[in-house]
Image (tube, rainbow, N blue to C red):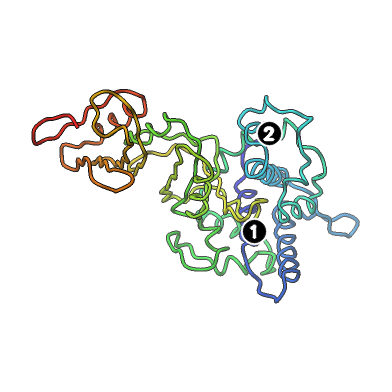
Amino acid sequence: MSVSNVALAATKLVGAIYEWDPNLGSSYMNNAAKEKIVKKLLDKVLFDATEENGQIKLVPNENKDKFIEMIKAMTLLTSGNVDTLRDPEQYDSRKSERWSRILSEPSEFVLKYLRFPFYEQITKEDYEKAKVILPEIGSSSSLTSEVLDVFGTLEGSDKQSRFEFILSGMSSEDDEDSGPKWKKTIRGYDKLYRGLHLMNDNAVILLTELGAPWDMERGVSTSRSQRVAEDFADIEGPNNILLTIDDPERKGFPALSLSKFEGEEEVILSGMIEIYNYELNFLIKEEFEGSSFINDGMHVQADPTSIIITKPQSGELVYAREDSHTTPEKVHNFIKNILGGLSVNITRESDGKKI
């Protein structure tokens, strides 16, 4: 199923509406206002109006099913079974949940309005479709101009049905970051964060190889919040990683309030990213004959042009290399040898003596 630009823009606008604060004095009134506008949006974009026996009837168009599949794919990534999403062959109907168990309240409202049977069990086919859709929506642009292009062509003079309450407040200046959350939801984010934990040593080694590609093409969960990503990375060790991702084209699908875990502020992102910088901190401890310091453990800090080794308790400097001869390749090889269990010789420059 190919992604429809109209359905994609509508999904992002629905997400923006649920980020919007009507400020009506109560959560009930706020939700009612959001739901009223969402219904108008869905009626305008996902249905065609036809006349039958003198009555106006709404008939679903090709965008309705595509819109529903995007919401389902987003939900399976943010609150479904991630292992089954990566490999749908692992699907087990005995363990599969009903959609109602993993949907957020906004997503459930939207699907219920579209008469999707959200009480049904999630199927293998659902995971298979999501696996195909996620790379597409994760690599989609969130630029304001694209949403304006879609909704600027809508017919009709009713300002509310044309969503002028949102569109009139938007700017086609894509680098403008001022304004409320809902406006930024449409514009997208030029910086995203991804927290990882329990990663293997090979992943850490890869991060120290500048220019190396990091594959996220399947569509992964990132966050617009650095704090959220840091907290996720710190859940459990070893090898905790925080990726800071520059995203100048503001690609990604803003799950945000449409996700069951709204507080994680998730943005689905797909693509290959390139490593151009890193900061690495780790402890080493190895016993071997002739060593004067490893027995007690050492703290290593490294980046592409420096290696600093200190005693973890006192912070006393043991070794530092920060000069033009410390190339990214040399640092990468140092890390690769350390994590690969190979021996590393560290000598003093003054007399060439092994430390």
Q: Nearer the viewer, mark 1 or mark 2?
A: 2
The Cα–Cα distance between marks 1 and 2, rounded to whole angstroms, is 33 Å
Marks 1 & 2, CB-CB < 8 Å contact: no
Q: Amino acid at mark 1?
A: Leu
Residue at the image position 73 percent from the left and 62 percent from the top: 40
Q: Give me the disc on residue 154.
A: 1
Assess disc 2: are there few (<14), some (14-19) or many (≥20) residues with their C-alpha within 10 Å of its C-alpha. many
Q: Position of residue 106 (x, y in %)?
A: 71, 56
Q: Amino acid at mark 2?
A: Tyr
Residue at the image position 46 percent from the left and 41 percent from the top: 240
Q: Please, what secondary structure does the residue beneath circle 2 have?
A: helix
Q: Position of residue 263 (x, y in %)?
A: 60, 56
Q: Position of residue 103 (x, y in %)?
A: 72, 48
Location of residue 149 by image quarter = bottom right
Judging depth in this view, the residue of 262 and 230 nearest the camera is 230
Residue at the image position 66 percent from the left and 53 percent from the top: 258
Identify the residue at the far bottom of this view: 25
Residue 159 vs 299, above or below: the answer is below
Residue 34 vs 72, above or below: the answer is below
Location of residue 95 by image quarter = top right
Assess disc 1: are there few (<14), some (14-19) or many (≥20) residues with their C-alpha within 10 Å of its C-alpha. few
Judging depth in this view, the residue of 349 and 31 nearest the camera is 349
Is 314 positioned to the left or the right of 144 in the image? left
Q: Please, what secondary structure does the residue beneath circle 1 have?
A: loop
Q: Which residue is mark 2?
A: 127
Q: Position of residue 286 (x, y in %)?
A: 34, 29
Identify the residue at the far left of this view: 351
Q: Tag 2 or tag 1, which sits nearer the N-term?
A: 2
